[in-house]
Image (spheres, rainbow, N blue to C red):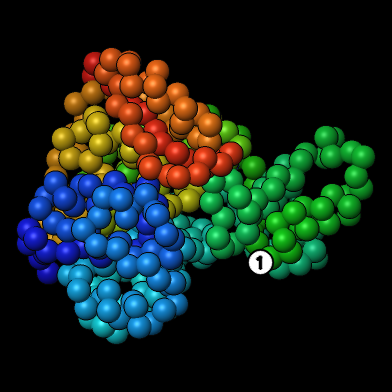
């Protein structure tokens, strides 16, 4: 399968990731057709064509499937049925339905990671208060309760404090509160990892099975949202090599085509655990657009279009910082700074916690 210049890449989702994918496609002479339920989406501003429709609209999806050469997605919560409808209309989808299915459910995701021999936080499935209590007996406190599906940017999760800080609640009250906080939905209880650092691996697998990885960023989160990625991560070389090997095993086992973002905890002992993965381009890889010859966005387009993968080598050190909510107002000052690449997503409404843009500060390469 090869999509040649002037071919059309269908992208499900109209957010900033779709916008940056569409821009990368255009640079290669490919056209992006965005499919999104949203009017005025960030991706629509820069796309060749846009279909506004729901992910359950079989007729619109079929028409979209007819006019694109390949379909990819920019967010992982695309319903499985959407991919099935597209497949029925001969629109090949990459990454495939399996990667999507695994990434959409935290329990299946953790079981998959363990099945390829990689570690995760200890976990226990939670379907009611009794299984939450059983999980806490097994895993202990502190812990984190996360919904199995549809969580992002720290949403759909609540922390369960260590015993001594839990007062004035009784155990029972505290458990009930946590269960209510995540909406009494099928969940997973995770042991709290006292990590030394969080890193991620942005890697790609081409249609021929070739795998390429970018250098690992160190990621700083606040309130579950990525604040900054620092590149390169000042992590032990062994830990980064282990993380890259795990990401590569995941890609091969899933028979994956495209870019994946895998988040890792590095333990104080030096070991690595997988936190989660996203079957798409990833916020912690945005810096690649400014510090590498071929960005994660172009790499993803190359992979799904059947092109050779590009060179992921980094020409600069950098720090990527998200502009969240009102911080986007800093664009005036930021746009005066030297060696600073400002990216704004064209969102019409600024909301607290909403990712409005990001900025990458480039520095001389150290290693
Ligand atoms: P997630 O949405 O699962 O990626 O969680 C967002 C952030 O919360 C992570 O990047 C970590 O900083 C933190 N976090 C999530 N799970 C755990 C855990 N089991 N132990 C410690 N911190 C966690």
Q: Is residue 289 left or right of residue 270?
A: left
Q: Is residue 91 above or below residue 142?
A: below
Q: In terms of depth relative to the viewer, which is nearer, 98 or 295? A: 295
Q: Which residue is depicted at the point 45% across and 57% down?
A: 113
Q: Which residue is depicted at the point 72% across and 61% down?
A: 183
Q: Is residue 255 left or right of residue 220?
A: left
Q: Examine the rendering and report whether any part of residue 251 can be seen.
A: yes
Residue to which mark 1 is pinned: 186
Q: Is residue 319 above or below residue 263?
A: above
Q: Position of residue 289 (x, y in %)?
A: 25, 36
Determine the secondary structure under disc 1: loop
Q: Position of residue 181 (x, y in %)?
A: 75, 54
Q: In terms of depth relative to the viewer, which is nearer, 72 or 16? A: 16
The quadrant in which the N terminus is found is bottom left
Q: Position of residue 5 (x, y in %)?
A: 7, 58
Q: Is residue 296 left or right of residue 8?
A: right
Q: In terms of depth relative to the viewer, which is nearer, 106 or 271? A: 106
Instruction: Count numbered badges in the picture.
Output: 1
């Amino acid at each position: 399968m090869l999509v040649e210049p002037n071919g059309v890449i269908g992208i499900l989702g109209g957010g900033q990731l779709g916008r940056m994918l569409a821009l990368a496609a255009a640079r290669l002479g490919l056209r992006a057709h965005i499919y999104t339920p949203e009017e005025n989406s960030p991706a629509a501003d820069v796309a060749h064509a846009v279909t506004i429709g729901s992910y359950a609209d079989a007729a619109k999806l079929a028409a979209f499937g007819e006019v694109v050469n390949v379909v990819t997605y920019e967010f992982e919560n695309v319903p499985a049925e959407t991919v099935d409808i597209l497949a029925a209309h001969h629109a090949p989808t990459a990454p495939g339905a399996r990667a999507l299915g695994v990434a959409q459910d935290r329990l299946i995701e953790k079981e998959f990671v363990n099945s390829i021999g990689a570690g995760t936080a200890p976990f226990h499935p939670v379907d009611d208060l009794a299984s939450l209590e059983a999980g806490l007996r097994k895993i202990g406190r502190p812990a984190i309760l996360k919904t199995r599906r549809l969580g992002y940017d720290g949403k759909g999760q609540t922390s369960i404090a260590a015993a001594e800080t839990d007062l004035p609640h009784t155990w029972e009250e505290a458990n009930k509160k946590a269960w209510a906080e995540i909406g009494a939905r099928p969940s997973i209880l995770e042991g709290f990892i006292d990590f030394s650092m969080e890193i991620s691996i942005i890697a790609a697998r081409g249609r021929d099975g070739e795998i390429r990885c970018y250098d690992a960023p160190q990621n700083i989160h606040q309130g579950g949202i990525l604040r900054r990625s620092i590149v390169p991560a000042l992590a032990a070389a062994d830990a980064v090599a282990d993380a890259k090997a795990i990401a590569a095993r995941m890609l091969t086992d899933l028979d994956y085509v495209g870019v994946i973002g895998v988040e890792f905890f590095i333990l104080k002992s030096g070991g690595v655990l997988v936190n989660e993965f996203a079957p798409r381009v990833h916020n912690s890889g945005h810096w690649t657009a400014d510090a590498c010859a071929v960005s994660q966005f172009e790499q993803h387009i190359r992979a799904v279009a059947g092109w050779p993968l590009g060179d992921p080598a980094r020409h600069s050190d950098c720090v990527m910082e998200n502009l969240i909510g009102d911080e986007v107002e800093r664009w005036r000052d930021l746009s005066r700074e030297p060696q600073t690449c400002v990216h704004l997503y064209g969102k019409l409404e600024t909301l607290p916690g909403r990712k409005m843009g990001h900025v990458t500060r480039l520095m001389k390469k150290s290693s």
